[in-house]
């Protein structure tokens, strides 16, 4: 090891450690390249002012951004960087220039009558550009603010896609590059659940990091070259909701397998649950029968009309009740929500839609309900096999 902490050709060790910051590398050439980050030399692009401490990064930048095939700038010819305001110092600028600088970091595109928005966030400085964890940490506040603003107007779904550049060096000094995208899963947040944003965001970050680490592990030798961009896609979400009373189709009405509560409010989900728990022989469809029992179930935080997305919340608040929701269209039955709970008071519901209205109803004879489908023998076998654990 040289006096200045650099690696010399005489070194013969299996674990190469940077004497400045303690970072360790398995290969000497990786350590040599890393040590350039601690030097006092800055390479600056003559076209746009981009700066870096690594000559290879500047060469690739000029080739990619300015179509300059080679950068032959020598260290002896390096001029001090031009005096310019760095983007990480925007908080010290006048208010208008702060706003302009931040707008350049986050570009927005819309589609489908503003129903879909895509926010493009780029690294604000070199530290974020070369450190994915730091990049996420610095952008988290901006992302939370974007999601909170959109949640004031609508329920939302969102996902993130991170675009990075990876590099892999070969022993002969050559290298390969790749620009993969790492995506999070789609998250759904209702207007009543704004407090869930940080949790859902952390889940998204974790999914991105897992994909990132798997790429490195499976690729053998890949390392992060730079973070290019994070795309945040936000869409409006309108969950299915059950509302006031609707007439049953004639075929289902004749089957006598459905109890259709005749409510005028939007609480059909509540009335359907209560009707499954209290059996009235006379006028069971009369909503007044179930009014005395409204406090027997916990509906805290549940909206009216009740969206399908809140059924799992209802089950958590009512440990002894489980729910399945089915749709019915043109003689076909299909599941909309299937419970994961067993050994509970179980409720099968039909979610029926007509024009712009929808309504929950109690399926009080499940086998007879299945018999109303086309090809009901095969369909019955499939559904009964699927839900056998419930009964």
Image (cartoon, rainbow, N blue to C red):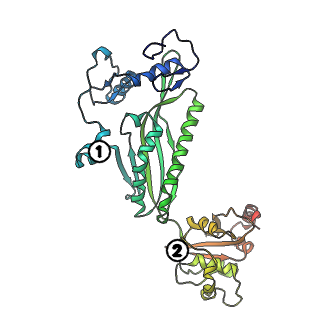
Q: Which element type, helix, strand or loop, lies under badge 2?
A: loop
Residue lying at the far top of the rendered structure? 10
Residue 247, percent from left and from top: 58, 81
> Split into 4 quadrants, where in the image is the C terminus?
bottom right
Does 103 sit left or right of 167 as displayed?
left
Residue 66, percent from left and from top: 31, 28
Q: Which element type, helix, strand or loop, lies under badge 1?
A: helix
Q: Residue at x 27, y 48 (%)?
A: 99
- The residue pinned by badge 1 equals 91
Residue 346 in which image quadrant: bottom right
316 up-or-down from 21: above or below: below
Pointer 2 or 1: first along the chain: 1
Q: Dot 1: within a 10 Å radius of its alpha carbon, few (fewer than 14), some, or many (20 or more) residues?
A: few
Q: Residue at x 45, y 21 (%)?
A: 33
Residue lying at the far bottom of the rendered structure? 282
273 up-or-down from 309: above or below: below
377 up-or-down from 210: above or below: below
- The residue pinned by badge 2 equals 305
Q: CA distance from mark 2 to mark 1?
A: 46 Å
Q: In this orientation, does residue 131 appear?
A: yes
Residue 128, percent from left and from top: 41, 37
Q: Residue at x 70, y 70 (%)?
A: 320
């Amino acid at each position: 090891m040289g006096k200045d902490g650099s690696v010399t050709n005489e070194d013969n060790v299996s674990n190469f450690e940077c004497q400045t910051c303690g970072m360790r590398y398995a290969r000497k050439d990786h350590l040599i390249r890393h040590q350039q980050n601690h030097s006092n030399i800055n390479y600056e692009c003559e076209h746009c002012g981009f700066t870096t401490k690594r000559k290879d990064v500047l060469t690739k930048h000029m080739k990619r951004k300015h179509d300059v095939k080679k950068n032959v700038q020598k260290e002896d010819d390096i001029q001090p960087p031009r005096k310019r305001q760095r983007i990480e110092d925007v908080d010290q600028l006048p208010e208008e220039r702060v706003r302009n600088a931040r707008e350049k970091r986050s570009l927005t595109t819309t589609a489908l009558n503003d129903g879909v928005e895509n926010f493009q966030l780029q690294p604000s400085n070199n530290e974020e550009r070369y450190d994915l964890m730091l990049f996420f940490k610095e952008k988290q506040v901006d992302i939370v603010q974007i999601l909170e603003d959109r949640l004031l107007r609508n329920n939302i779904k969102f996902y993130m896609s991170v675009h990075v550049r990876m590099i892999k060096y070969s022993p002969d000094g050559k290298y390969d590059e790749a620009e993969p995208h790492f995506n999070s899963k789609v998250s759904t947040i209702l207007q009543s659940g704004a407090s869930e944003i940080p949790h859902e965001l952390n889940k998204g970050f974790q999914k991105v990091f897992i994909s990132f680490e798997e790429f490195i592990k499976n690729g053998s030798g890949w390392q992060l070259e730079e973070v290019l961009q994070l795309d945040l896609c936000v869409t409006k979400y309108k969950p299915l909701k059950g509302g006031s009373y609707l007439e049953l189709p004639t075929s289902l009405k004749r089957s006598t397998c459905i109890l259709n509560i005749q409510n005028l409010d939007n609480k059909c989900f509540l009335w359907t649950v209560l009707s499954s728990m209290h059996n009235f022989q006379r006028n069971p469809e009369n909503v007044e029968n179930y009014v005395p029992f409204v406090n027997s179930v916990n509906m805290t935080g549940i909206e009216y009309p009740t969206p399908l997305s809140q059924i799992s919340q209802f089950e958590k608040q009512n440990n002894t009740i489980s729910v399945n929701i089915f749709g019915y269209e043109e003689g076909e039955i299909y599941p909309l929500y299937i419970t994961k709970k067993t050994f509970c008071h179980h409720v099968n519901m039909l979610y029926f839609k007509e024009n712009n209205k929808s309504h929950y109803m109690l399926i009080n004879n499940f086998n007879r309900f299945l018999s109303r489908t086309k090809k009901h023998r095969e369909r019955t076998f499939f559904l009964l096999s699927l839900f056998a654990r419930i009964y």
